[in-house]
Image (cartoon, rainbow, N blue to C red):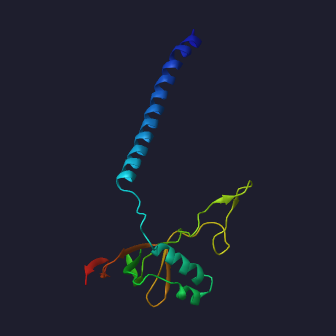
Amino acid sequence: MKFSKYFIVLPFLLISLTGCVRDSEKDIYRTKNIGDTLAKNQPTPTDIGYSLERYNLIRRAYWVNGEKEKARAVKRPAEVPMGYCVLFSYGKVLGQFNVDGKVTSLNSFLTPSTTYGSDSKELPDVDGSYGENDTGIFFFTPQWQYIEWNGEYLYSDTPFKVSDTVLEDY
Protein backbone atom coordinates (compact mmCIF):
# COMPACT_ATOMS: atom_id res chain seq x y z
CA MET A 1 0.00 0.00 0.00
CA LYS A 2 2.79 2.42 0.86
CA PHE A 3 4.42 1.63 -2.46
CA SER A 4 1.38 2.79 -4.46
CA LYS A 5 1.29 6.13 -2.60
CA TYR A 6 4.75 6.93 -3.99
CA PHE A 7 3.52 6.29 -7.51
CA ILE A 8 0.75 8.82 -6.95
CA VAL A 9 2.95 11.49 -5.30
CA LEU A 10 5.97 11.10 -7.61
CA PRO A 11 4.30 12.39 -10.81
CA PHE A 12 3.04 15.51 -9.01
CA LEU A 13 6.51 16.14 -7.62
CA LEU A 14 8.10 15.78 -11.07
CA ILE A 15 5.53 18.09 -12.66
CA SER A 16 6.12 20.78 -10.05
CA LEU A 17 9.91 20.55 -10.45
CA THR A 18 9.59 20.68 -14.23
CA GLY A 19 7.64 23.93 -13.85
CA CYS A 20 10.54 25.43 -11.89
CA VAL A 21 13.03 24.41 -14.56
CA ARG A 22 10.84 25.84 -17.28
CA ASP A 23 10.51 29.13 -15.35
CA SER A 24 14.30 29.29 -14.97
CA GLU A 25 14.78 28.58 -18.66
CA LYS A 26 12.26 31.31 -19.47
CA ASP A 27 14.19 33.76 -17.28
CA ILE A 28 17.43 32.87 -19.05
CA TYR A 29 15.77 33.32 -22.44
CA ARG A 30 14.23 36.66 -21.40
CA THR A 31 17.56 37.91 -20.02
CA LYS A 32 19.33 36.93 -23.24
CA ASN A 33 16.66 38.77 -25.26
CA ILE A 34 17.12 41.89 -23.14
CA GLY A 35 20.87 41.75 -23.77
CA ASP A 36 20.31 41.27 -27.51
CA THR A 37 17.88 44.22 -27.62
CA LEU A 38 20.29 46.50 -25.76
CA ALA A 39 23.19 45.45 -28.01
CA LYS A 40 21.04 46.22 -31.06
CA ASN A 41 19.92 49.61 -29.68
CA GLN A 42 23.43 50.51 -28.44
CA PRO A 43 25.87 48.64 -30.69
CA THR A 44 29.54 48.25 -29.88
CA PRO A 45 31.43 51.11 -31.54
CA THR A 46 33.35 50.02 -34.60
CA ASP A 47 35.09 53.32 -35.30
CA ILE A 48 37.61 53.27 -32.42
CA GLY A 49 40.98 53.66 -34.10
CA TYR A 50 43.31 53.26 -31.12
CA SER A 51 43.16 51.34 -27.84
CA LEU A 52 44.80 52.78 -24.72
CA GLU A 53 44.32 49.36 -23.13
CA ARG A 54 46.43 47.66 -25.82
CA TYR A 55 48.94 50.52 -25.67
CA ASN A 56 49.42 49.85 -21.93
CA LEU A 57 49.62 46.09 -22.45
CA ILE A 58 52.31 46.44 -25.13
CA ARG A 59 54.35 48.84 -22.98
CA ARG A 60 54.02 46.50 -19.98
CA ALA A 61 55.08 43.43 -22.00
CA TYR A 62 58.36 45.14 -22.85
CA TRP A 63 58.79 46.82 -19.44
CA VAL A 64 58.41 43.79 -17.19
CA ASN A 65 60.70 41.78 -19.46
CA GLY A 66 63.53 44.27 -19.02
CA GLU A 67 63.17 46.05 -22.36
CA LYS A 68 62.37 49.53 -21.06
CA GLU A 69 63.71 51.34 -24.12
CA LYS A 70 61.34 49.37 -26.36
CA ALA A 71 58.51 50.23 -23.97
CA ARG A 72 59.34 53.93 -24.24
CA ALA A 73 59.50 53.70 -28.04
CA VAL A 74 55.97 52.31 -28.46
CA LYS A 75 54.08 54.73 -30.69
CA ARG A 76 51.01 56.32 -29.22
CA PRO A 77 48.31 58.72 -30.33
CA ALA A 78 49.16 62.41 -30.40
CA GLU A 79 47.53 63.00 -27.04
CA VAL A 80 47.09 60.51 -24.23
CA PRO A 81 44.75 61.67 -21.47
CA MET A 82 46.13 62.35 -18.03
CA GLY A 83 44.56 60.38 -15.21
CA TYR A 84 44.84 60.57 -11.45
CA CYS A 85 44.98 57.60 -9.10
CA VAL A 86 45.03 57.21 -5.31
CA LEU A 87 46.01 53.87 -3.77
CA PHE A 88 44.45 52.79 -0.46
CA SER A 89 45.18 50.11 2.09
CA TYR A 90 43.02 49.57 5.17
CA GLY A 91 41.49 53.03 4.75
CA LYS A 92 44.87 54.79 4.58
CA VAL A 93 46.22 56.60 1.55
CA LEU A 94 49.43 54.93 0.42
CA GLY A 95 50.10 56.96 -2.69
CA GLN A 96 48.75 59.47 -5.18
CA PHE A 97 49.92 59.40 -8.79
CA ASN A 98 49.45 61.11 -12.11
CA VAL A 99 48.66 58.43 -14.69
CA ASP A 100 49.91 58.56 -18.27
CA GLY A 101 46.78 57.36 -20.04
CA LYS A 102 44.75 54.95 -17.97
CA VAL A 103 44.95 52.12 -15.46
CA THR A 104 44.76 48.60 -16.87
CA SER A 105 43.80 45.30 -15.30
CA LEU A 106 46.62 42.83 -14.75
CA ASN A 107 44.23 40.26 -16.22
CA SER A 108 43.89 41.99 -19.59
CA PHE A 109 45.82 40.32 -22.38
CA LEU A 110 46.81 41.11 -25.97
CA THR A 111 45.74 37.69 -27.19
CA PRO A 112 42.82 35.50 -26.17
CA SER A 113 43.48 32.83 -23.60
CA THR A 114 42.64 29.83 -25.66
CA THR A 115 43.74 26.38 -26.58
CA TYR A 116 44.74 24.77 -29.83
CA GLY A 117 45.07 21.30 -31.31
CA SER A 118 43.35 18.08 -30.47
CA ASP A 119 45.16 17.90 -27.11
CA SER A 120 43.73 21.30 -26.07
CA LYS A 121 47.14 22.79 -25.33
CA GLU A 122 47.07 26.21 -23.68
CA LEU A 123 48.60 29.09 -25.64
CA PRO A 124 51.29 31.10 -23.83
CA ASP A 125 51.11 34.82 -23.21
CA VAL A 126 53.35 37.15 -25.27
CA ASP A 127 56.18 36.66 -22.76
CA GLY A 128 56.01 32.87 -23.14
CA SER A 129 54.42 32.28 -19.74
CA TYR A 130 51.27 30.38 -18.89
CA GLY A 131 48.65 30.81 -16.18
CA GLU A 132 46.90 33.78 -14.67
CA ASN A 133 48.22 37.10 -13.48
CA ASP A 134 47.64 38.44 -10.01
CA THR A 135 44.44 40.37 -9.51
CA GLY A 136 45.08 44.09 -9.66
CA ILE A 137 45.93 47.01 -11.90
CA PHE A 138 48.96 48.64 -13.43
CA PHE A 139 49.75 52.01 -14.92
CA PHE A 140 52.64 54.24 -15.94
CA THR A 141 53.30 57.72 -14.62
CA PRO A 142 54.41 60.56 -16.94
CA GLN A 143 57.91 60.08 -15.43
CA TRP A 144 57.92 56.44 -16.65
CA GLN A 145 57.39 54.84 -13.27
CA TYR A 146 55.63 51.49 -13.57
CA ILE A 147 53.08 50.99 -10.77
CA GLU A 148 51.35 47.67 -10.09
CA TRP A 149 48.73 47.48 -7.34
CA ASN A 150 46.42 44.81 -5.98
CA GLY A 151 44.45 46.89 -3.47
CA GLU A 152 41.70 49.46 -3.53
CA TYR A 153 42.13 52.52 -5.69
CA LEU A 154 40.35 55.59 -6.95
CA TYR A 155 40.88 56.73 -10.53
CA SER A 156 39.62 59.87 -12.23
CA ASP A 157 40.31 61.93 -15.31
CA THR A 158 40.17 65.13 -13.24
CA PRO A 159 42.72 66.15 -10.59
CA PHE A 160 41.86 65.60 -6.95
CA LYS A 161 43.66 65.18 -3.68
CA VAL A 162 42.81 62.92 -0.79
CA SER A 163 43.68 63.86 2.75
CA ASP A 164 42.55 61.77 5.70
CA THR A 165 40.62 59.67 3.17
CA VAL A 166 38.38 62.63 2.28
CA LEU A 167 38.15 63.48 -1.41
CA GLU A 168 38.66 67.19 -2.15
CA ASP A 169 38.62 69.18 -5.41
CA TYR A 170 41.75 71.14 -6.24
Q: Is residue 141 left or right of residue 113?
A: left
Q: Position of residue 23 (x, y in %)?
A: 43, 33
Is 40 or 97 nearer to us in this picture? 40
Q: Quadrant of residue 116?
A: bottom right
Q: Which quadrant, please, contains the C terminus?
A: bottom left
* Residue plotted at (63% across, 70% down): 125
On screen, residue 151 versus residue 132, left or right, reads left
Q: Is residue 28 above or below residue 125?
A: above
The answer to whether 123 appears left or right of 76 in the picture is: right
Q: Quadrant of the N terminus?
A: top right
Q: Is residue 52 above or below residue 146?
A: above
User: Looking at the image, which residue is at 59% across and 67% down?
Assistant: 111
Location of residue 17 in the rendering, given as x and y in whole percent from the top left corner:
48, 28
Q: Is residue 81 visible?
A: yes
Q: Quadrant of residue 133?
A: bottom right
Residue 40 lies, in percent from the top left, at 38, 51
